[in-house]
Amino acid sequence: MINMFEVNETNKMIEQENLDVRTITLGISLLDCIDSDLDKVNEKIYNKITTYARDLVETGEKISAQYGIPIVNKRISVTPIGLIGGAACKTTEDFVTIAKTLDRAAKKVGVNFIGGYTALVSKGMTPAEELLIRSIPQALASTERVCSSVNVGSTKTGINMDAVKLMGEIVLETAQATRNQDSLGCAKLVVFCNAPDDNPFMAGAFHGVTEADAIINVGVSGPGVVKTALEKVRGEDFETLCEMIKRTAFKVTRVGQLVAREASKMLGVPFGIVDLSLAPTPAIGDSVAEILEEIGLERAGAPGTTAALALLNDQVKKGGVMASTAVGGLSGAFIPVSEDQGMIDAVTAGALTIEKLEAMTCVCSVGLDMIAVPGDTKASTISGIIADEAAIGMVNQKTTAVRLIPVIGKGVGETVEFGGLLGYAPIMPVNNFSCEAFVARGGRIPAPIHSFKN
């Protein structure tokens, strides 16, 4: 039972500390939409999404009104389109028609993003998956709500360096294709190693082939709540600090569990997981960087940052798993530069570099996220950064990702404004020494020895 004290405490977290449910994401399998006729594929996809998700937005609003819990986004994830379009799509333009169908369906049901314009190529690429990847710039330039992801590596398979090389080129092409929007298309494109099948957060959400026909996954968020809680134990030892983070993560995750259960019941769709990631926003006081500073750092990026983030990530997971029957997705602490005012301030102050962010990704939930870089950055440099992040994920048996935004026409010292949850970002410098010969080798970096567990 929840007592009155807990009700009042939750209300305070919502009203004063930016607690919200970041997203209810409805995962929909499109495996039964596969057809050799492209028109039929598009028709089946549109009909299935608009049927299954017709009440999603209304349900989220009802739950929000009933419990007073802000539910910021309602989203959809679908089976990787690289699989669904394989039989019908013979050109990149064929795949783009599916992207447009997804966009049209998303607008019809009122969700803000739909994820799953995806290829899973950690060991090799089918001709269809390569076509999908090559279609990404055009697909993201001609749609508003479609998000794309590509998984280029895993602990079990190693890293597909042919895909890594290609993705460096695709990121740059996407930047060029959306240059009139400050290369916004790249904010909807993420490159993964060890991509999870049940992630509710964009841009990397897709509905894994091991999932049910439809599933509800919920992503919670509470950096502001954690920051406020830690103010009460300022100067205390690490054991006290860890206990406070665990207790707070437990409370935040309980809110997500409640929303997930209600959404599942109202939509008649099974509950999947709660992703208990601390997902920041540009709002003041809703920052992972500010949590790190409350732990004792002058700025995020100072010596000790990686250790502080490791502690935070671990305690969030320990507290969250006690509050929900099923925790999944990414679950931990996000460090997207443009979406976190504290991170932006740290970059501006010179405390935080891409190299330090890379070190932090060894212990956080994802990777190099929402980082704006100069528009003249080479494709091979982007590929090298992707390879570095994929190696961290592969060796450490964790999810890592890269969402870089080469902003065409802008350089170091300038800023780019994306708006909304995507925020704004300073253009960060990258290491300009070449890795072209390394990236051009092709083939596959083998899986590490500890991946062999059969």
Image (tube, grey):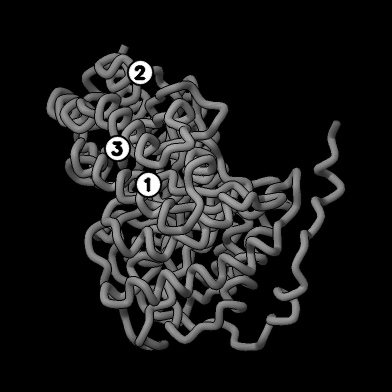
Compare marks 3 and 2 and give the one earlier in the sequence.
Answer: 3
> Which residue is painted at 28% across and 47% down in the image?
103
Identify the residue position indicated by label 3 in the image: 21
Question: Is residue 202 shown above or below 84?
Answer: below
Depicted 381 relative to depicted 401: above or below: below
Report how far apart the C-alphas of labels 2 and 1 lie in the structure: 25 Å
Secondary structure of the residue carrying tag 1 is: helix
Residue on which disc 1 sits:
98
> Mark 2 sits on what residue?
269
- What is the quadrant of residue 268 in the picture? top left
The crowd level at tag 2 (other Cα within 10 Å; few <14, some 14-19, many 20+) is some
Quadrant of the frame with the C terminus:
top right
For the residue carrying disc 1, how many other residues have a C-alpha within 10 Å: few (<14), some (14-19), or many (20+)? many
Q: Which mark is residue 25?
A: none
Camera-nearest residue between 364 and 43: 43
Give the residue at x 27% y 19%.
267
> Does residue 441 appear left or right of residue 282 in this picture?
right
User: Marks 3/1: CA distance?
Assistant: 30 Å
**Label 3 packing within 10 angstroms: few (<14), some (14-19), many (20+):** many
Q: How many marks?
A: 3
Residue 16 screen position, x and y as percent = 20, 45
Q: Is residue 441 left or right of residue 293?
A: right
- Amino acid carrying label 3: it is Val
Q: Position of residue 431 (x, y in %)?
A: 59, 84
Quick check: 436 left or right of 176? right
Residue 225 picture location, percent across and down: 32, 44
Relative depth, front residue between 326 and 250: 326
In the rendered structure, are the residues bearing label 3 and label 2 in contact, judged by CB atoms less than 8 Å apart?
no
Q: Is residue 441 placed above or below 311 in the rendered structure? A: below
Judged from the image, the secondary structure of the residue bearing numbered disc 3 is strand
Tag 1: amino acid: Ile
Q: Mark 3 or mark 1: which comes first in sequence?
A: 3
